[in-house]
Amino acid sequence: MRPGWIVGAAVAASMAAAIAARADEAYGANYGLHDPTYLVIGAGSWEVARGNLSTGEADLTLRPAHHWWLLKPELGLVVAGDGDVLAFAGPLFEYYLTPALVGTVSTSVGTWAGGGFNLGSRVEFHSGAELAWRFADESRLGFGFYHTSNADLTKRNPGSESALLEYSLPIRIGP
């Protein structure tokens, strides 16, 4: 290994860390970087764009307070009334439009199983957006719209849309 490459990598890593620290200090309030961990409970409709196949849906998502730069992780589970189940994980990005109105976009990869609508692959991508009102106790109530698709990994890729009412419960972990 060349010493120049090592020095370059160290400088790049230091710059990335400084940018991430600056984002936390300067923009933490706008990007929800100081928010607690959330347990998001959602209820709504699976296959909302296909009226003849539409069924109930329940979601449970954990959004830890940890972040890397402006991205936070999320882990979730979707259970549809037709027997479809999706487990997913990926990054999300939040932005406070006002001190109480929060916009969130996310994209995740997951695994699908089920006996309902055939999504064409066990590997699925789950992307969406949410608009929520943040209350004084840090809980949130919002509306989310999500698309689940295998991104043409297989010939069959019908996708599925979900519309949900979501409640985000703040969870305090630690002292």
Image (spheres, rainbow, N blue to C red):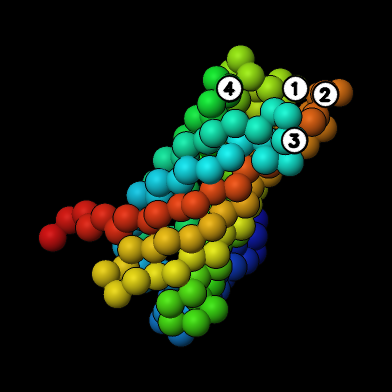
Q: Position of 136 compared to 158: left or right?
A: left
Q: Residues within 10 Å of mark 2 (few under 14, many from 20)?
A: some
**Residue at image point 47% right, 43% down:** 43
Q: CA distance from mark 1 to mark 4?
A: 16 Å
Q: Which mark is residue 156?
A: 2
Instruction: Give the label, 1 or 3, closer to the camera.
Output: 3
Compare residues 1 and 105 and report the one nearer the observer: 105
Label 2 element class? loop
Q: CA distance from mark 4 to mark 2?
A: 19 Å
Q: Residues within 10 Å of mark 4 (few under 14, many from 20)?
A: some
Name the quadrant of the C terminus. bottom left
Instruction: Give the label, 2 or 3, closer to the camera.
Output: 3
Q: Which residue is tagged 1?
A: 120
Q: Which residue is tagged 4?
A: 82
The earlier-in-sequence mark between 4 and 2 is 4
Q: Position of residue 158 (x, y in %)?
A: 79, 31
Q: Position of residue 136 (x, y in %)?
A: 29, 75
Q: Position of residue 93 (x, y in %)?
A: 55, 62
The earlier-in-sequence mark between 1 and 4 is 4
Label 1 element class? loop
Q: Is the Cβ of the residue at disc 4 closer than 8 Å to that at disc 3?
A: no
**Residue occupying the far right of the picture:** 155
Label 3 element class? loop
Q: CA distance from mark 2 to mark 3?
A: 16 Å
Q: Which mark is residue 50?
A: 3
Q: CA distance from mark 1 to mark 3?
A: 16 Å
**Residue at image point 60% right, 31% down:** 55
The earlier-in-sequence mark between 4 and 3 is 3
Give the total of numbered labels: 4
